[in-house]
Image (cartoon, rainbow, N blue to C red):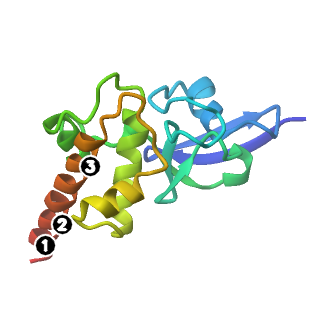
Amino acid sequence: MSLSVRLIINRVPHAVELDDPRVTLLDLLRERLHLTGTKKGCDRGQCGACTVLLDGRRVNACLALALSHDGAEILTIEGLAEGDALHPVQAAFIAHDAFQCGFCTPGQIMSAVGLIGEAEAGDDPERVREGMSGNLCRCAAYRGITEAVVEATRTMTAAAREKAA
């Protein structure tokens, strides 16, 4: 028996047939749709490497069953930039050298975008660290990550103010 799931991934509609109802969103993205920017780290929801935005909220894709999110809108690292223009969080990560090996970077960036969207941290480094605590970096680039998130928050807040004016 096959089951159908419809998802909007990076603003593109997808209809996927699943042979197994236990397929995770992470495995669907990586293995079926070949969106390999979302990383499989621990596969237990402990490292944050698989963070994506699901209906605008941060989730660990390794813990989300694809079938449970029929009709959802998903944003992955591949859908973040607009053409050749990097998202402000991506640009800030580069400017602050907020990565070393790069394995956790997609999850870190997606978590940062979600955190900024939640407007919970503002430009307080301690709150940013707390808000990003579900994303681990084995290279310990946390200082650069925090600085990048604070800068991106300021940049995005200023851009939003200009747009509203």
Q: Amino acid at mark 2?
A: Thr
User: What kind of element bears circle 1?
Assistant: helix
Of 61 and 139, the residue lying toward us: 139
Residue matched to label 1: 161
Q: Amino acid at mark 1?
A: Arg
Image coordinates of residue 47 in percent, x first then y, are 53, 39
Residue matched to label 3: 146
Q: Quadrant of the N terminus?
A: top right
- Distance Cα–Cα, label 1 vs label 2: 6 Å
Image coordinates of residue 53 in percent, x first then y, are 48, 51
The correct choice, above or below, for 103 with respect to 165 in the image is above
User: What kind of element bears circle 3?
Assistant: helix
- Tell me whether the residue at label 1 lies in contact with that at label 3, contact meaning CB atoms closer than 8 angstroms: no
Of 126 and 55, the residue lying toward us: 126
- Tell me whether the residue at label 1 lies in contact with that at label 2, contact meaning CB atoms closer than 8 angstroms: yes
- Distance Cα–Cα, label 1 vs label 3: 23 Å
Q: Amino acid at mark 3?
A: Thr
